[in-house]
Amino acid sequence: MNVTPPLLSTITPPLPETLIANLSVLNIHTVPDLIFIPPSELLRRLPKGSITFTELTRHIAHVTQAFAGPVITGDKLIEELDALAQFESVSSGLPALDGLVGGTFGGASGGRVIEICGPRASGKTVLALHIILYHLDAHQSDAALWLDTTGDLTPARLATLTSHSRNGPTTRKESLTRLNIATAFDTATATRTIEALDTTSSNNKPPLPRFRIVVVDTVTVLLGPQLSGLSSQGHAEMTMFMRLLREGAQKHGLCILVLNDATAVRRPALGASFTFMTDATLWLAHVPGPDRELRTVEVLRSRISAMGSRCAFRIRNGRALEA
């Protein structure tokens, strides 16, 4: 998949319309177009008197900050790594799948926001549930949050999973008590829920369960209706919500899975700029043929592993199994 860099028109808070128009004349439309030109050279090419050097450098810094990772000092980094070392890594139980995200979905290696996208009925929800319950079965002191944006995660659906634990149905039933489900049909509710999770994660100490995994199912329904080519408000909400998720993942060593639908063949919903807001984008799909259990996962974009990598696995009785 060819990933289009973020457009300057999607920056929040927005750049001045006059500046965007003048940059467009110079064929400068995206974030890389702007930040890789020396400010002095750019000022020379812009209409004389349209902007001062100080204003221009301030806008460039704003754009850079919006799409760059946070700066952290060495001593602070060591403190955070020491804190993360107490957490167990989040694994799918499938070495090939874990390898697509750098060996782990989060935990001791640091917090991660992973996008799992694909067509409807490709198995996104089943895979996310498998990752949660595989972890909770093995780690009785951990908990998970499922942010349900459609109301589709019913008790009946969860009941079918109780007999498929690697440690038996009793263990699975206990694990399900540590899976917290919250509904959120708009970004305001979702934001409040994530903020409450941050407070809980900061305050909970053993023996209280620690949240290790968060799933947003689906982010498409949550953010898609707000996006419009005529207004930057939807992009602003998307950026702020994803930044909240990233900050929470990094602060608490969380595995955050955002499930996203597809708008076309091998193209995730929510636009190209969304893929820059996660650590990796995984494309999940059926393998063509009579075997309805077989799935493939491919890395479409990643900052933690090799793009283009892929693996196969099976979905059977709500579990992900090696192919």
Image: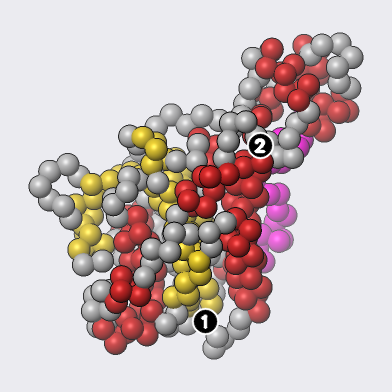
**Given this view, does label 1 or label 2 mark the residue nearer the observer?**
2
- Name the foreground residue: 206 vs 86: 206
Seen in the image, is 48 located left or right of residue 94? right
Which residue type does callout 2 highlight? Answer: Ser
Q: Is residue 89 left or right of residue 61?
A: left
Question: Label 2: how many residues lie within 10 Å, few (<14), some (14-19) or many (20+)?
Answer: some
Q: Is residue 174 magenta?
A: no
Q: CA distance from mark 1 to mark 2?
A: 39 Å
Q: Position of residue 316 (x, y in %)?
A: 20, 63
Q: Main secondary structure of the magenta part?
A: helix
Residue under label 2, please give it. Answer: 232
Left or right: where 187 falls relative to 168:
right
Camera sees residue 50: yes
Q: Please give the name of the residue rendered at 82% of the width and 26% of the height, measured from the top-left corner.
A: 56
SS state under label 1: loop
Colour scheme shown: secondary structure
Which residue is more in the foreground, 219 or 209? Answer: 219
Residue 68 is one of the magenta-drawn residues: yes
Residue 50, horizontal then vertical, whole percent: 86, 17
In the rendered view, tell whether residue 79 sits above or below residue 58.
Answer: below
State whether residue 214 is above or below residue 238.
Answer: below
Q: Earlier in the sequence, mark 1 or mark 2?
A: 1
Specify the quadrant of the image occupied by residue 251.
bottom right
Kindly identify which residue carries mark 1. 209
Q: Position of residue 282 (x, y in %)?
A: 39, 47
Instruction: Inspect the image, locate mark 1, and give the three-letter code of the amino acid beneath it.
Output: Pro
Which residues fall within the magenta stretch? 60-80
The residue lying at 51 percent from left, 45 percent from top is: 224
